[in-house]
Amino acid sequence: MKDIVVSGARPTGNLHLGNYLGALKQFVAMQDSYNCYFFIADYHSLTTHPNPKDLHQGVKTVLVEYLACGVDPEKVTLYLQSDLVQIPELYLFLNMHAYVGELERVPTFKEKVRTQPDNVNAGLLTYPTLMAADILIHKATKVPVGKDQEQHLELARVYARRFNYLYGAEIFPEPVAFNMGNDLVKVPGLNGAGKMSKSDDESTSIFLKDSAKELHKKIMRAVTDTGPTMENQPKTEGVQNLFTLMSYVSDPEAIAYFETEYNAMRIRYGDMKKQLAEDMNTYLTPIREKIEELSHNDAYLKRVAEEGAAKARISAQNTIDEVRAIVGFKSF
Ligand code: AMP
């Protein structure tokens, strides 16, 4: 039997290069050989209180972008998280055995407490149990995600193990974070620090829909430094990030050329950025064109979402029926 795979992204804006390399590219690579469930994590997006008027458009944008990246609804089960009532039901069961202390220790939660003290809601605290429910609802074993999700996956394993142990049932396998290329990916932003993120200033993320002009403008403004002052000098984070971005989209010869120039203290960051912008544009153009084409095809999107939800519900309901029986719920 094929391994079961589950993953998704939140519809909180356009997908960026980090989403693509950390998740979407993996989805496409896995769809021929695994039993894949890919979803749009619209419940997860509620932690940031999106305007109700914008929510549907956000979901549509991400559905279009999944399809534009090559996710094939004929090969995978593609659905909206909010179309499966079984997910919040499993979330409820898992929350009963999730402890506040362990949730408060999750680094992404601690970070939110620090950066948005006015909106530390219970949904944010229990984000890892909802994510565990997303995965366990289909009894997935592999979860194609970026490196930023590693910690959440650890908790999903804890909840799977704990549920099995407490009820003496072998219902949930332990899911692992997965990348076809072995290492989990962390794509940096253009601001000289950290990872590319939707919550950053938009000018420091590379979106799949960005035009050649936007890419050029953003990349030319990326943070670097005043240049190396000795041969083979270790790189500052901003410069290293540009080399990392190049490693995804440029020819090895171009990368080797700029490495040599850097090590010999001759590098002109402007030239390197121009090359990166050009290569990024070549890399993203087919996806951008597909986004444009699909965004006008509402009838197709509706069919994809409905058929995906119908398929996903079957697997989700089977799991919930088992869980309810294990927990002790019975019909009269
Ligand atoms: P999110 O946009 O946070 O809902 O994330 C959706 C997927 O994209 C998850 O699998 C993340 O791990 C992945 N992802 C988000 N940002 C990055 C990044 N900068 N590098 C690699 N993967 C990422």
Image: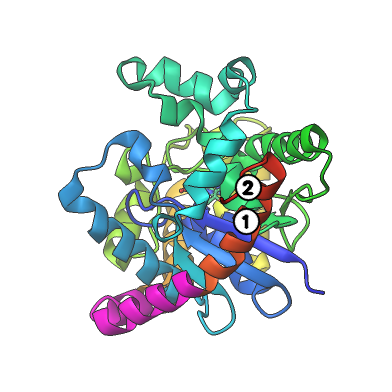
Q: Position of residue 274 (x, y in %)?
A: 42, 59
The secondary element bearing badge 1 is classed as helix
Q: Give the image quarter of residue 168.
A: top right
Residue 3 falls inside the magenta stretch: no
Q: Residue furthest front?
A: 332
The residue beneath circle 1 is 321
Q: Position of residue 36 (x, y in %)?
A: 63, 69
Q: Could you tell me if the residues under marks 2 and 1 are in contact, i.e. CB atoms within 8 Å?
A: yes
The secondary structure that dominates the magenta segment is: helix
The secondary element bearing badge 2 is classed as helix
In the picture shown, does residue 105 fall above or below 201? Answer: above
Q: CA distance from mark 2 to mark 1?
A: 5 Å
Foreground of the two, 147 or 62: 62
Would you call the spot at circle 1 few (<14 residues within 10 Å), some (14-19), or many (20 or more)?
Answer: few
Q: What amino acid type is highlighted by mark number 2? A: Arg
Q: Give the image quarter of residue 45.
A: top left
Residue 69 visible to the viewer: no
The residue beneath circle 2 is 324
What's the colour scheme? rainbow
| Picture disc at residue 87 | none
In the picture shown, does residue 139 fall above or below 225? Answer: below
Residue 294 falls inside the magenta stretch: yes
Q: Give the image quarter of residue 295.
A: bottom left
Q: What amino acid type is highlighted by mark number 1? A: Asp
Magenta residues span 290-310
Relative side of 263 to 305, left or right: right
Relative side of 321 to 158, left or right: left
Count of residue discs: 2
Residue 29 visible to the viewer: yes
In the picture shown, does residue 194 fall above or below 131? Answer: above
